[in-house]
Amino acid sequence: MRYSKTLIPTLKETPAEAEVISHRLMLRAGFIRKLTAGVYSYLPLGLAAIRKVENIVREEMNRAGAQELLMPMVQPADLWVETGRYKKYGPELLRFHDRHNRESCLGPTHEEVITDIARKELHSYRDLPINLYQIQTKFRDEIRPRFGLMRGREFVMKDAYSFDVSDEAASLSYQKMYDAYKRIFTRCGLEFRAVQADSGSIGGSFSHEFMVLAKTGEDTIVICKNCEFAANMEKAAVVVAPKERVEPMAELEKIETPGKRKVEAVCEFLGIEASKLVKTMVFKADGVPVAVLVRGDRDVEEVKLKNLLGAADVELADDKEVFDATGVPTGYLGPVGIKIKVVADQEVASMENFYVGANEKNFHLKNVNLDRDCTIEAIGDLRQITTADPCPECGGQLATTEGIEVGHVFKLGTGYSESMNATFQDQHGKEKHFVMGCYGVGVTRVVAAAIEQNHDENGIIFPIPLAPFSVVVLNLGVNDKVITDAAEKLYGDLQKAGIEVLLDDRDERPGFKFKDADLLGIPFRVNVGKGFVKSGQVEVKNRKTGDVEEMTPESLVTVLKKRISSALSS
């Protein structure tokens, strides 16, 4: 492809809207352009990178025995009502009515549609196992779309769905997809980890997220230094060893704490560690206020709270909502005699003679004991894990890192098939519900994550498998016939060798072309200029390493073909 004939609208300045590096560089490199909030047009080079990911995904899905289909983006609301997700999914589901006033939605995912296909088309155990996938545009009406393709409202996704006769068979399908995902992200040239994760609105009993490791990642991952354990913060289980009571229950005592509302201020005033204080935080669970107890130096993990309560939505109440629900100002809340439901983190259950708010302004209580003084609705793991906690699998030392979710695999079980009455006949003629799995790859997000992980101050550094072109040939003397003829011949020879190449044939200064080549992130840059006239050699630069070599055009084609083939086959 010729640069002069290709839409590559590079920018010198970073648009003000861009927050993270992938967003900045994709805008500057002319890969994407914003249409509206969270919705982007994919320009030729951006689409080329997306297609590279799609091809890798498609090859590995087919290799794993999955079959490709394509389902409608517009889905009837009736299907979502059957599973109960039409209300539960929340405002991210874009709902609308057609001209006949039939209610529909834009698909953020396709569990309902694929289950409807299965109940109509799969009737016998002989039809199973089967895994069906698509690569398709999705729409999720994010409240705060940001970061370009990292968190947009419209995006390209690969979603696959497996149907099996039993839990054991479903586990085999899950493992096939888990292994396929490892191959996909390895082939994409990414550094990643598979981590235990919460299943969220998709549901199911078990899931793993595939995280690209990057400093700018939105998610914090907990990993063990001693074993293979890795989990999202939302999922990482806190292990609390059983504790025998060592202190006798002391008498409850009310103490004045004038103006002391924050944990730090209360602890300093009372001369205690935060580990001796229990803070009472009010959350709204599906709109209903609930008090949550955690140690003073801990943070509530909202996903764990949502799962414990079985709620679709959980959010921290503001000061007014807290006062309306309890009659107590924030900072002095406590579980003794509070008017709303109370749940407690498991760590609090093992504490003795601790301090809490007295449900009265400027007062706290001393020597509170959960089993004596409080009515607790439920106790569970409700706090965020820390690096001071032991590994939940081996007891080893934990560490944290940042990651970007690019894939997610789920064991769904029979939740969808039961709610939609999707059944098959087993070998004994008995009707059974399909055991399902669900597997997603954020195709457009993979491109953004690759840039987050591979860039420098000059621009993108694409892994070879994802680059829109493997080689860019710079004609540094468009008005010199010898240089132009050499550049054209090299361009043609590279194409004949099956190498994807961009010829920069613009009448621009060399420095201008160098900057654009670096910005685009093409793995190999070949300079054809005055040096060729003198020596018959061209200069090739490796974008990733910065290494520069000189060689003849003939040897260059052989060398680059070998290097590119090696990268694509690894």
Image: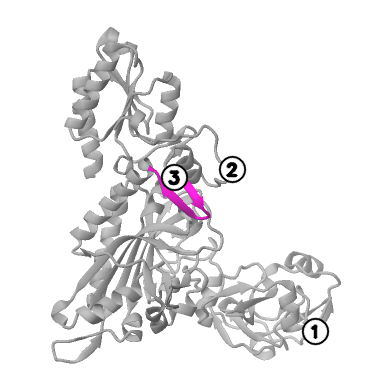
Q: Determine crowd level at label 1: few under 14, some 14-19, many 20+ residues with C-alpha closer than 10 A.
A: few
What is the CA distance from the residue labelled 2 to the residue labelled 1?
Answer: 56 Å
Q: Residues within 10 Å of mark 2 (few under 14, many from 20)?
A: few
Q: Pick the quarter of the image with the C terminus.
A: top left
Helix, strand or loop for disc 3: strand
The foreground one among 306 and 116 is 116
142 on left or right of 469: right
Residue 125 is situated, as x and y percent measured from the top left of the image, at 16, 82
Give the mark nearer the N terminus: 2 vs 1.
Answer: 2
- Which mark is nearer the camera, 2 or 1? 2
Residue 551 image-quadrant placement: top left
Instruction: Tell me where residue 176 appears, x and y as whole percent.
Output: 24, 65
- Check disc 1 and report its element: helix, strand or loop: strand
The residue under label 2 is: 16
What kind of colouring is applied to the model shown?
A: one colour
Q: Amino acid at mark 3?
A: Ile
Most foreground residue, 406 or 471: 471
Tell me if residue 568 is in the magenta stretch: no
Mark 2 or mark 3, earlier in chain = 2
For the record, the magenta segment spans 33-43
Residue on which the image places disc 3? 32
Quadrant position of the N terminus in the picture:
top left
| Residue beneath the point at 47% across and 72% down | 96
Q: Is residue 365 above or below residue 63?
A: below
Q: Is residue 112 above or below residue 497?
A: below
CA neighbours of label 3 inside 10 A, class few (<14), some (14 to 19), many (20+): many
Give the percent coordinates (x, y) of residue 74: 38, 69
- The residue where tag 1 is placed is 253
Q: CA distance from mark 3 to mark 1?
A: 63 Å
- Amino acid type, residue under disc 2 in the picture: Ala
